[in-house]
Every structure is written in C-alpha cells, then in structure tokens.
Amino acid sequence: MTPSAPYRVMTVCTGNICRSPMAEVVLRRRLDEAGLGPDEVVVESTGTTSEEEGNPVDRRARKVLEDAGYDVEPAASPEAHRARQVSAGDVEHSDLVLAMTTAHQRALLRIAPRASEKVRMYRSFDPAAAGQEGRALDVADPWYGDLRDFEECLDQVEAAAGAVVEHVQRALRR
C-alpha cells in the first residue's frame, strides 16, 4: 500500500556538497532499481550550515560518482544540485532523515526536537556497522582529502544503501 503523498527521504551533512548529495544520488538509483520511482519516494539532501548555500556538488564527489557509473546532473543544468541548509520544516515533512554524523544528528534534533523517531544515522543501516554507535557510525568526511577519501565515502554510502531501500520498502509495505 503506497500513501497518497510520496515517502520522503532526506540525507544531511555539513555543507550539502559532498556526503549528503552523494547519498542522495546513490539512494535515488537504488530506489529506482527497486521499482520505487519519484512518484513513490522523493530523495533530497541538505546541510546543517549555510556556508555552501547555492553551490553545486563538489567536483571530486561528482568525479567519484561518475566514475562509479552514477548519473549526476551537469553543474550548469537547471536541475543540477544546489546546496541548501536544512530547516525544521524539511525535517518535519520528511519520513526518514539520514544524518551523516553524530554532529549532524544533534543539529537536526536541535532544530526539530520532536523528530527523533525519524532521524537516523545513515551508517546505522550498514550491516558491517551493526552494533556500533556514536562516532563509529559517522560517514567519513572527504572534504580535506583527495579522491581516495571520496571513494571511501562512496563505499560507506553504498554499503548502507541496500538496507535503507529495504527500510523504505517496509514503510511502504512492499
């Protein structure tokens, strides 16, 4: 049974140019492969700060995603990702909010304190991270690194994506 409105998933990192848009791209593809298109599930990403507001996906994140076969909108495209800061309304209107780190999770719960049941650590869905908690669940920040750091980030994002899709399928009773 699918609700009348699409199920909403939001990924959240700091500036919304590296980790959260990488997770957004990966989840969109995985959900599409599972037969859950944008009419059923909407995936968006935001950041906890406004420091990158309006900027496109980081060029290194884009390269790693494209090298792995993911479609990323060209930066000049009108549909291209533009970084934006999360709001309380974003959290409240989402069904599942996936924080990239414990700091992001705390920030989300500060702006939307009644949303604790829907705010989860992204890597809590990674089977290899089972039983871990706190900072052990943080998705590595590639910002100060090189392409290998972005590849590690993508590996962590991909490792949890399947279980996120299963969670959404259960929520939609599919």
Image (cartoon, helix red, strand yellow):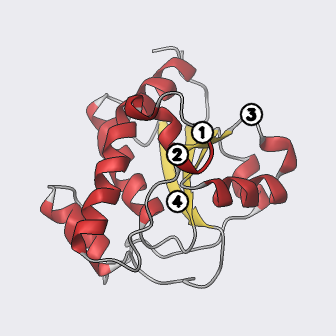
State how far apart marks 3 and 1 are (Cα).
16 Å
Front tag of 4 and 1: 1
Residue type beneath disc 4: Ser
Please, is residue 30 above or below residue 171 in the view?
below
Which residue is label 1 attached to?
133
Which residue is label 2 attached to?
137
Residue 117's label in the rendered image is 3
State how far apart marks 2 and 4 are (Cα).
19 Å
* Quadrant assignment, res 96: top right
State how far apart marks 3 and 2 are (Cα).
17 Å
> Whole-percent x and y of residue 12?
57, 58
Mark 3: few/some/many CA within 10 Å (<14, 14-19, 20+): few
Local SS, label 3 = loop
Mark 2: few/some/many CA within 10 Å (<14, 14-19, 20+): many
Quadrant of the drawing holding the N terminus: top right
Mark 1: few/some/many CA within 10 Å (<14, 14-19, 20+): few
Q: Which of the pair 3/132 is nearer the observer?
A: 132
